Structures are given as structure tokens and as C-alpha cells.
Amino acid sequence: MERGGTLARRARAPWLHSAGVADSQAHCGRGARGCPGAACSAGSRPVAGSLAPVTLRLYDTAARGLREFVPLTPGEVGIYVCGATVQSSPHIGHMRSVVAFDVLARWLGRSGLRVTMIRNVTDIDDKILAKAAAAGEPWWAWAMTHEREFRDAYDALGVLRPSYEPRATGHVPEMVELIEQLVARGHAYGVADGSVYFDVRSFPEYGALTRQRLEDLSPADDGELAGKRDPRDFALWKASKPDEPATASWSTPFGRGRPGWHLECSAMAERYLGDTFDIHGGGLDLRFPHHENEVAQSRAAGRGFARYWLHHGWVTQSGKKMSKSLGNSLLVSAILEHTHPVVLRYVLTAAHYRSMIEYSDDTLREGQAIWERLAGFVSRASERVGALNAAQVAAAELPAPFVDAMDDDLNVPAALAVVHEHVRTGNTALADADATETRAALLAVRAMLDVLGLDPGASPWVGVGADDRAGAALDALVSAELDARAAARTARDFSTADAIRDRLARAGVLVEDATDGVRWSLASEQEGTS
């Protein structure tokens, strides 16, 4: 199955800040929604040709409610997303996270903000060491192998590359510095074996993110209890063990060892986004202990850290959270053997990011059918009125109901309802041969789907419709019928020609006699079959 060009997938959006991108005013790519140039700021949200205040509201886990999003720096937004621990191959639960925050980044960029997106890679971890040892591989080779698998999966699903994708092993000096500050402030302590722990009782706000009382929490499971002041104290630095590779440890003032999981994200977020930044994201399962511990260590060190906390729902199967124990059938590589990447992307995008997605074959079949309707309309309309280029799509004014939906905590289901409404309008215009309305609907549909990373007319999805083999077979069968119809018409056997056309119509194939030849297309769901 054709997946689209790799280089095209890796193209970076103009609003996504990265190394080598100038710090001057970034083009937001909105055109008529529009980038107002030097005046573009957090307060500029042009809709229908006018300037309007930012109205984006996001559900902040810490506040337990919707909050108006006001960026720390006007015109810019910094996002930190917890990335993969590259211990094994990616499953679709991992993809839920990157797709959800890809949509967020796209929407913020379309809204005129320059986006700095950081998504880390945890490439040193207990599980990585254990699995590499079991496989007889160096731990760093094991990590890199799976990091590449994750990147391939992200690319296959059309996820934009982040501004930076730092590895934990590349930021040990920053982590050591953070530990030293916590020790100096009385929030951390070392033990005899060289490990260092965060003293949870030293930080009165511990548990505030998840609204839990300290006395109700279970002991932390990331170190030996011996030497801990409190069983709930968590590891900042883990002393090296005799059975671990020497290459999996670093020499520090505390002794040789490696960083604790929670410490990594605090250090890397500060390195690339500063002491205080806008949005921290991840899955619901990361709220505790991971994000709670990040908050504690960062704020105990005097950082403001994240101002908004966004958490996405899980992908479930039979009501249970996706996990590696459910089998290889849920690995991204296995799913893409029988499902096109854009269909999987649609399924992961279509639900609200805070809801659960119940995975099943029916879910994929429904996604396939909807994608074919969307791509089919774009294909038919483009053939009728001409293809639109990327600049035209980027400059298109988005329908106000779509904007309202996206500004309402990224309400993608409501936004897609607006997309389908415009597809219906476009199909009617096609049937009425109304080129003006067809083009308007095509432009609106492509612009809205572009925000969701699902534009059928753009890379990597251009030309992707039904399964290629099925499409080829259908094309051969319909062509044979049309050849027979043409022969009947040449012989002036119009009853046979009409019967063939009617037979195709009953099968959902519409035939159009044009001046430059015969065209056929699949009927839309609304047109149906007779």
C-alpha cells in the first residue's frame, strides 16, 4: 500500500519553531483568518475577516475545569509533551498521545502563535536495561532501535516533527545541577549507596496536582526503602548496580548512577522552554506519580514550571487500557499491515482528546468509510473545479462554527460535524454543476481537515482513498462495463446502454457523460444506491 513520501511527511509547519528558524515574526498560515503580520499576537484571532480576541479554552487538569488560554509570551506558546520510553515497539496507545498534541500544535499555529513543541525520549530506564539484557543487546542499541520505530510510526501517521526531541541521556548535566539545587534547598537527600531521593514531606504542596493527601499515597516503587526518610520519597538519582552495564551510569558528586524518570522531564523542559512555560501534556496515567513528582521537584527548586496541564484519554480494548500485554495485534506495525495510516490517524483524531477510544475492527471500518467519503469529495470536487495549492488552503477563512468548536477545548467531534456539513453542501453543488459553490466547499473542507492533519489533497494523504487493490479491481470492472456501454451506444442499442448505466447506479457508481469523455465516481452516502 502506498503510504506517501517520507520527505513530504517530515516537512515542518511554518509556525513550528525549531533550531535554525529565525526568531522574527512567524507566518501563521491563516490568511483570511489571517496572519496580521507584525501585529499578530496572542490577542489576534481574525475570523470572517475581522480581528477578535483569543477565545481558546482548554481543560486544565490542575484547575479541574476550562480555562481561557493566555500564553506566557504574546504570540508564542511553549509545549512540553512526555514522549516515549523506548523499551519496545509502539502500539496505538502511544499514537493517541502524539496525535492529540499534534492537533493542539496545529490549531495553535493556525491561530497565529509560534509554537515551540518539545517531546522527549526516555532512552535510559530500568525496563530498557532489563529488556536489552534479555535480548543480549547493548542497552543503547536497544533504545535506538525502538526510538527509530517510534519515529517511523509518527511519520506514518502524518505527525509533525516537534521543535526539539531531546534524549534523557543527553541532558545529565542539567539533571545533576537540578539535584544539587534541591539538596541545597533541603528538598532532597543522599543515601549510603549513592542514590538521591526527593523528600516529599519537605514540599507542603505535594499531591496538589492530583488532589491527594500524602498520608493516602502508596510507597514509591523506584528504589530501596532502606535509607529513605519516607517510603513515598521518590528517586532523583539511582546508584549504579553491579549487574548493570558500566555504560549505563554517569560519574557525579553523588556517585556513579543514572537519573530517575521524573527528574528527566523537569530538566529537559527547563532546558528548552525556561523556568516557566505554557502547556505540559501527557496521558491520564501520567498524572500520578510522574507529573505530580515533576511539579514537586521543579517548584521546590524555585521554578514556575507548567501553567496549564492537559491530559488525554486512553485507547481501550474491551474497556481496558491499552497495554503491551494485550498482544502484538495492537502494535502500530501490525495494524498498518491491513489499515492505511490515514485511517488510523482519523480514528485517533475524531474522538475528543479527553475521551476514551474503544479499539475494535469496527472502529477501523467506520474510520475507513468516513475517510473514503471525505477523500472522495475532495477528489471529485478537485477534478471538477481544479486542485487547490497549499497556499490557498493555508490562506482560507475557516468557518466560524469550526473555529468555535476547536476553541472549545479542541472539540474535534463538533468540528468534524462542520466538515461533514460542508461535504454535503459540496456534493449538492457537484450534482447541480455549481462550480462556485463546489470550489467554496472544497476550500473550506480542505482547510478544516488541514487543521486536523487530515487534508486529502495534501501530503502525505493526497490520492489516498480506498485500498489500492480494491480500487484497481473496481476500476477494471467499471471500465469493462463502460466499454460495453460505449459499444452498445455505437451500435445504437440504447436500451442496453441505459441498462448498463442503471446497473452501475444500483451498485453505487455514478456515470457522467462529459464533452471530453465518460467519467465515473462513487456515490456519496447521501446519494446512496437505488
Image: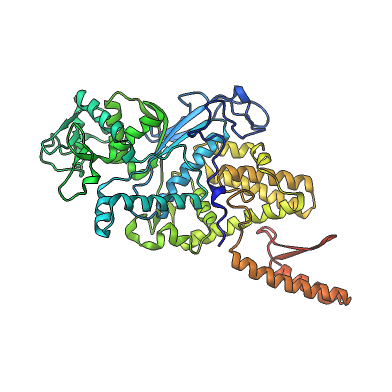
- In the picture shown, does residue 205 fall above or below 287? above
Residue 249 seen from this side: yes
Q: Quadrant of the C terminus?
A: bottom right
Please tell me in which quadrant of the rendered image residue 369 appears: bottom right
Residue 87 seen from this side: no
Q: Is residue 129 left or right of residue 471?
A: left
Residue 266: percent from the left, percent from the top? 32, 33
Which of these two is toward me, 162 or 305? 162
Q: Is residue 506 left or right of residue 159?
A: right
- In the picture shown, does residue 198 fall above or below 365? above
Residue 272: percent from the left, percent from the top? 40, 31
Residue 335: percent from the left, percent from the top? 46, 61
- In the picture shown, does residue 439 fall above or below 339? above
Farthest residue, direction right: 492
Q: Is residue 163 left or right of residue 424?
A: left
Q: Residue shown at 30%/40% (left/top)?
A: 290
